[in-house]
Amino acid sequence: MNTTMEGLLLLEINTFSDHRGYFRETYRRERLTELLGREVDFVQDNQSWSRKAGTLRGLHFQLPPRAQAKLISVASGEIYDVTVDLRPGSPTCGGWESFVLSAENGRQLFVPEGFAHGFLTLTDQVTVCYKTSGYYAPECDSGVKWNDPTLNINWPLNGREPVISAKDAALPLFSQLKSIDWGLK
């Protein structure tokens, strides 16, 4: 599916269901390459589990030279997934886009290098799976504050305070980020 930001791709995954449950092919390199028009070499798989609805993780990214593309899917539960374009010169730089991903709808989100990523759990007991195109590098770990007033992300908190880590609460504002050379073509 098309998104409003270049390089960002929402994937609808075929699901084959019967009385036993369902089957999904969650990753096929040739299919993703065809959709993106380029090959992405995923080198690491990660998984997060969140106990309660209202848990907010992000907005995270890795700085160059260890920037990562991500392929996000949900194995259990439902999330409100948000991406922020950080690419200087992009017509959507500083803009954000959101998607609901769930185990039930089977959608996946491809997040290219140059984007921050985060999510809010909409249900209890949420497992999120990430394929990444680069290894985790603590020295390049970065992020943007989830409630940055410049970004003005409309998180569906319904008046609740999110469950958030101390690390994520201390992330800088978008205006505090230095211009990042993502080295993208």
Image (spheres, helix red, strand yellow):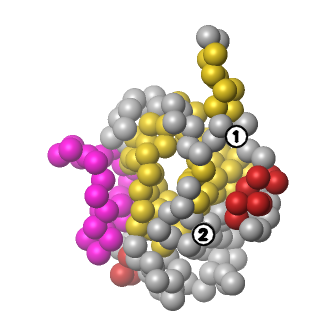
User: Mark 1 is on which residue type?
Assistant: Thr
Rendered view: 12 above or below 144: above
**In which quadrant is the C terminus drawn?**
bottom right
Which residue shows up at 26% across the image and 46% down it?
A: 157
Q: Is 162 located above or below residue 146 in the figure?
A: above
Residue highlighted by disc 2: 7
Looking at the rendered structure, the kind of residue marked 2 is: Gly
* Residue at x-position 46% and y-position 83%: 91
Q: Position of residue 5 (x, y in %)?
A: 50, 70
What is the secondary structure assignment of the residue under circle 2? loop
Relative to 124, 40 lies left or right: right
Residue 30 pos. (x, y %):
82, 54
User: Which x, y percent locates residue 139?
Assistant: 62, 69
- For the magenta stretch, what is the residue range? 145-171
Q: Residue at x 37, y 38 (%)?
A: 122
| Farthest residue, direction left | 159
Looking at the rendered structure, the secondary structure element under dot 1 is loop
Q: Is residue 151 visible?
A: yes
The answer to which of marks 2 and 1 sits earlier in the sequence is: 2
Q: Residues within 10 Å of mark 2 (few under 14, many from 20)?
A: some
Quarter occupied by residue 154: bottom left
Q: Nearer the viewer, residue 9 or 79?
A: 9
Q: How crowded is the residue under tag 1: few (<14 C-alpha within 10 Å), some, or many (20+)?
A: few
Q: How far, Cα to Cα, is label 2 from label 1?
A: 19 Å
**Residue bearing mark 1:** 26
